[in-house]
Amino acid sequence: MKNLKFIIVIFVMAFYSCDNYLDINDSPNNPTSDLINPKLGLSAAITKPYRAHTRTANQLGNVWMNNWGGNVNQYTSAYSTEYSLQLGNNFYNGIWDNYYLNTANLTNIINYNSADYDDHKAIAKIMKSYFFQQLVDLYGDIPYSQAHIAGLLNPAYDDDKDVYRSLYTQLDEALALIDGTHPATSIAVGAEDPVFAGDMDMWKKFANTLKLRLLIRESVLAETDAASATYLNSKFTELASASFMTTDVVINPGYSDGNNNQQNPFYNLFGLDTAGNPGTSAQVVVATQHAVEFLNGTEPNTTFDNRISKLYKPITGGSYVGVIQGNQGAGNVPPALSFLGNGLLVSSDQDGYLMTAAESYFLQSEAVVRGYLTGNAKSLFQTGIQSSFDLLGVGASAAGYIASSDALPGIGWDGTANKIEAIMTQKWVALNGINGIESYIEYTRTGFPATSVSTVAITPTGDLPKRLMYPTSELTGNSANVPSISLAQIFTQGPFWYVPAN
């Protein structure tokens, strides 16, 4: 399957003279985009924005959520900007710029003038919703209704709640396209789909799970906002009989060690290049002391978690050693620190992750706890933990961990009065290294896990920011429309669903 996917994408590269096998056209205003039919363009349309997701956004989330620190034994002031929270308009602007640039290819597929590609269009709608939810979660109001319109260089900003509603509708539209009557000339999705290889039933489950995530994100607001509560109750009624993801949602267009551009982008950055040399950030990222002690069971109210053996690499002697974020130089840190482990860094052709089964189960568990769905919340919670162990290849040790952690406050189900805290703590562990930005967004929403945020980063202000600042590209290229927000405001103003703690 991977080889066939690779052949198809190579064909796109050869036919359109692109720079590498994941590229189609970078400009949303390039007229040649109309010449690339959805079958040829689908793989690159999904994999291009995913690259920024697994590298840039993932790194920020893992640093802020105290999973990753800088290897200060080799690099001076590693992650000092992330720690200092001097967050200007150039801070991690690659998230915004790459998402907007590369999701234009999804819009091109959606707008392609042919009913023969309805399933391709459905997939594009689902993936566009996936990436645009994260844009709202990180920035609030964004251009949406006028985004990717050819020739329009200054799109208007939409209210972030309205965008959320539109994303949910877009997922409904995708499901309708999948279930609708297809013309006899309809072109089936196949190996050009780097996620499910044309299995549209799986795409339906993924769309339902994304709908669940959109609704759950608003659930804290719905506790005090009647309009949100009414909306959520209505939509959850529609999801009552829906099927959600029970397996990991992986992406792989044919990653290989053929050259650096063909490697899995996470592995290329944090692992080894095709010549066997460390990637750009491979020697920078190390475990934090907090993450190591939490997983080792040496922090109070924790227990040994075998996932540490896959998330981090042991130093000589077999122990795991992390850095306290912000500590600098010889004498302040141990001489040897644990790098990322072989559960995260497998090989050049490893799968990427859009959503893990664990995340799906934790979302379902929270929905049951909040009374929106029926089911066994504890069973869903513990299945989420098991799924995380399975993903990392240590599934056999999950049962022992679940039993030993169950009575622990803030970690286990029976030991935690506020079940949301237990869910968020286990989601933080399950997303370590895989989708760190989701952990940060969930912390913004719930305040949990309160003890697993960067202690050095919150020192200047008392907490992490609730959102990011708009990038320089918007201030210079769309100055008439970009909302004005100051550095101070991002610590008090989040997306529409953010509710300040009492």
Image (tube, grey):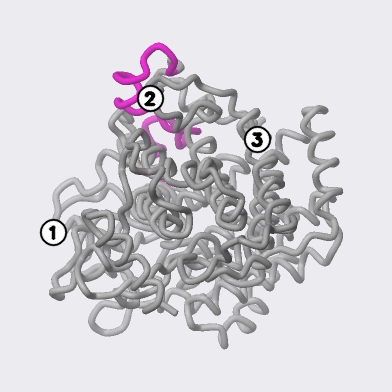
The residues colored magenta run 454-482
Q: In the figure, residue 19 lies in which quadrant?
A: bottom left
Residue 307 location in percent, x, y? 47, 75
Q: Is residue 499 left or right of residue 176?
A: left
Q: What x and y, as percent, mark residue 75?
A: 14, 54
Q: Which residue is mark 3?
A: 166
Q: Amino acid at mark 1?
A: Gln
Q: Tell me the CA gap for discs 2 and 1.
A: 47 Å
Instruction: From the image, state whether disc 3 or disc 2 is nearer to you.
Output: 2
Rendering coords of residue 111 (x, y %): 53, 41
Give the residue at mark 1. Answer: 74
In this view of the protein, which residue sits in the foreground, 333 or 59?
59
Report helix, strand or loop for mark 1. loop
Q: Is residue 318 left or right of residue 397?
A: left
**Residue 244: quarter of image:** bottom right
Of pointers 2 and 1, the one earlier in the residue sequence: 1
Task: Tell me the mark number nearer the camera, choosing from 3 and 1.
Answer: 3
Give the label on residue 19, or none: none
What kind of residue is marked 3? Ser
Nearer to us of marks 2 and 1 is 2
Reply above or below: 8 against 81. Answer: below
| 151 in relation to 46, above or below | above
Residue drawn at x 31%, y 77% as measured from the top left: 347
